[in-house]
């Protein structure tokens, strides 16, 4: 992970967590539902790839869920893969999705 990645901003109007770097925007789109935070899609522009910004965004989304007592529903394939490697976020994960991830087993992302 970069020594000092740019800060992630919650752009609530656009329903996405954003990371701005080098004039580009990487983001993790989300939807809110009662008691749930659905993480939909992570996108990192090609010029920003290789800096682990997708991981920074995934952590930001998961921490937002934790801080706001929301269960995370990981529709995004990148976030699902991230969760398989980071059991410290098990408590924030929607229990139905936790069971599905366990059934899939750990895979390389």
Image: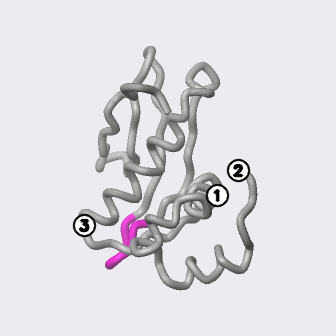
Of circles 2 and 3, which is in front?
Answer: 2
Of callouts 2 and 3, the N-terminal one: 3
For label 1, the residue is 81
Q: Are marks 2 and 3 in contact (CB under 8 Å)?
A: no
- Residue 34 forms part of the magenta stretch: yes
Q: Secondary structure at mark 2?
A: loop
| Vertical arrangement, residue 10 with respect to residue 52, above or below | below
For label 3, the residue is 68
Q: Position of residue 49 (x, y in %)?
A: 61, 27
Report whether 90 appears left or right of 44.
left
Q: Are marks 1 and 2 in contact (CB under 8 Å)?
A: yes
Magenta segment, which residues? 32-37
State the residue in front, 11 or 67.
67
Residue shown at 37%/46% (left/top)?
14
Q: CA distance from mark 1 to mark 2?
A: 5 Å
Report whether 34 appears left or right of 100.
left
Of callouts 1 and 2, the N-terminal one: 1
Q: Position of residue 88 (x, y in %)?
A: 44, 65
Q: Residues within 10 Å of mark 2 (few under 14, many from 20)?
A: few
Q: Main secondary structure of the magenta part?
A: strand
Of callouts 1 and 3, the N-terminal one: 3
| Vertical arrangement, residue 12 with respect to residue 27, above or below | below
Q: Are marks 1 and 3 in contact (CB under 8 Å)?
A: no
């Amino acid at each position: 992970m970069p020594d000092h990645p740019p800060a992630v901003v919650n752009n609530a109007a656009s329903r996405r967590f954003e990371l701005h770097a080098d004039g580009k925007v990487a983001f993790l789109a989300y939807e809110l539902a009662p008691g749930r935070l659905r993480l939909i899609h992570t996108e990192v522009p090609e010029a920003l790839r290789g800096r682990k910004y997708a991981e920074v965004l995934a952590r930001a989304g998961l921490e937002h869920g934790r801080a706001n007592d929301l269960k995370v529903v990981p529709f995004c394939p990148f976030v699902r893969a991230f969760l398989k490697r980071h059991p410290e976020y098990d408590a924030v994960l929607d229990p139905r999705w936790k069971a599905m991830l366990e059934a899939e087993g750990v895979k390389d992302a």
